[in-house]
Amino acid sequence: MVTAMLMVVSCSMFAADAEPAIPRFNDGRDWFFEKRFGLFVHWGLYAIPAWHEQHPYRLHVPREEYEKLIHQFNPVKFNPDAWLDLAEKAGMSYLCITTKHIEGFCLWNTAQTSYNVMNTPYGKDILAQLAEACHRRNFPLCLYYSVVDMHHPNYPNEGRSYEYEKPAPGDQPDLSKYLAFLRAQVTELCTNYSAIHGFWWDGNVVKYQDPSYNALIRSLQPQAVINNRGFDAGDFSTPERDWNDEVNQQLAFTKPTEACQAIGRQSWGYRAEEDYYSDEHLIRSIDKILAKGGNYLLNVGPMADGTMPPEGVRILEKIGAWYNAVKESFDGAPASHLVKNREILLTRKGNTLYVHLNQSPQTCAVYMHPFNVKPKTAVLLNDGRNVETRVDLLPWDHENGKPVLRLYNLPVNDFSDTVIVVKLEFDDPVPWAGK
């Protein structure tokens, strides 16, 4: 009798507490809200010394010494379909690659500089091959491009982040000339490789602002989403490596957001002696962002021969086993505001709630204040087993004097290196006891 009465009370109260909604673009860019987990790829000459993608900057390597690496770049085992096979196995549905990082080396056949892949022993357009595979497999392709260019003679190196301390002998620093070079390269990237679904700026340490650059991209590739690290605010924000406290504390994103993380702590490019993150850390990071309504871009740096590092393959396969089992939970809207328990995250789709044990659980139970109605079904998405539920007055809540929905006897020790997600189906509408 108590349950039935609470259901009547809860109907209107739940409707008044609608989930926060991220505004859509209402054009071709809306693919971004459907394909939310992507593969980030940092690849360039820095894969040869295998230390860090900012090798010349962090080790103060003179340009004339570093640029010799172009004569060693020969990734004979590069196979874009193998990359996409791995991405799909991980549950990823789009890819973003570094066309040019701060080193200035270009992975495509650019007419603007000879410092590109065509002048290596490999001698083939990496981007063209990857774009062909992505288009053939209907796998959206996004392009990273660094504003900083430590190699270009017109780039004004002044000792800011990712720059040389001063111009090299023979350089002719001129920001306007360099930006003309940049505009020409962006035009190539957005013209010569068919459909491009995103443009990922980085390294605008000169702090130059000019919306015409993004306008150029939009005119050539209207379906491309553009990040916020370029010459204006762009379409989406890019919190990095779980560092942003606001991201960690908020319950749901209100603006388009794509978090980015690498599989290793030290480098985004391939590092021979990388300190890899634990499976648990990465999975909890992914779950946190996706359950809050954001996108997630996870980076793996290929080795110099073009193959993915074995530990990177293992990590992506591990993530895929978890992600593909719980993927439906991310189709729902963020709903953590409906529960008082801040050790979990909620997503909601219709009269189904998904409970994400995003923090390492302290016990084998989850308390769902203020929910106090049993779901008709409760399933552990990780392996399909049924979950026990009760509506109890708990000893720790005796002063509150109200029963609460409890998920109990959860197999927390069986999934200690991942995130447990429980699917709760309620009768229509989803009951919530409210205040």
Image (spheres, grey):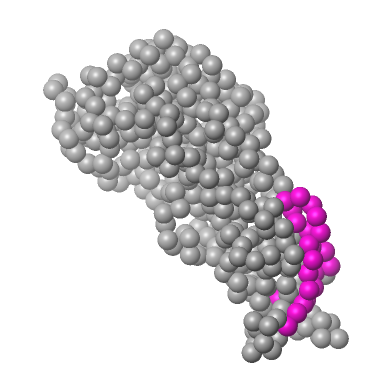
Residue at 52% in and 41% down: 298
346 drawn magenta: no
Residue 29 or 432: which is nearer the viewer?
432
User: Residue 431 location, x and y as percent?
Assistant: 75, 75
Q: Residue at x 45, y 21 (%)?
A: 304
Q: Residue at x 70, y 86 (%)?
A: 402
Tell me if residue 56 comes above or below residue 213 in the rendering: above
Left or right of residue 169: residue 191: right
Q: Which residues are magenta?
A: 371-393
Q: Quadrant of residue 423?
A: bottom right
- In the rendered image, is residue 190 in sight? no
Q: To which quarter of the image does residue 311 belong?
A: top right
Q: Is residue 363 visible?
A: yes
Q: Is residue 28 left or right of residue 407?
A: left
* Screen quadrant of the N terminus: bottom right
Q: Is residue 163 left or right of residue 392?
A: left
Residue farthest to the left, as pictured: 169
- Image spot of residue 173 (x, y percent): 17, 30
Q: Main secondary structure of the magenta part?
A: loop
Is residue 427 placed above or below 35 in the rendered structure? below
Which residue lies at the image location 79% right of the left edge and 66% below the top edge?
A: 388
Query: Who is closer to the viewer here, 431 or 46?
Result: 46
Place of residue 356 in the rendered image (x, y in percent of width and height, measured from the top left):
64, 60
Assign the C terminus to one quadrant of the image. bottom right
Q: Quadrant of residue 15?
A: bottom right
Does the magenta segment cover residue 379?
yes
Q: Going by the picture, which residue comes out furthest to the front? A: 413
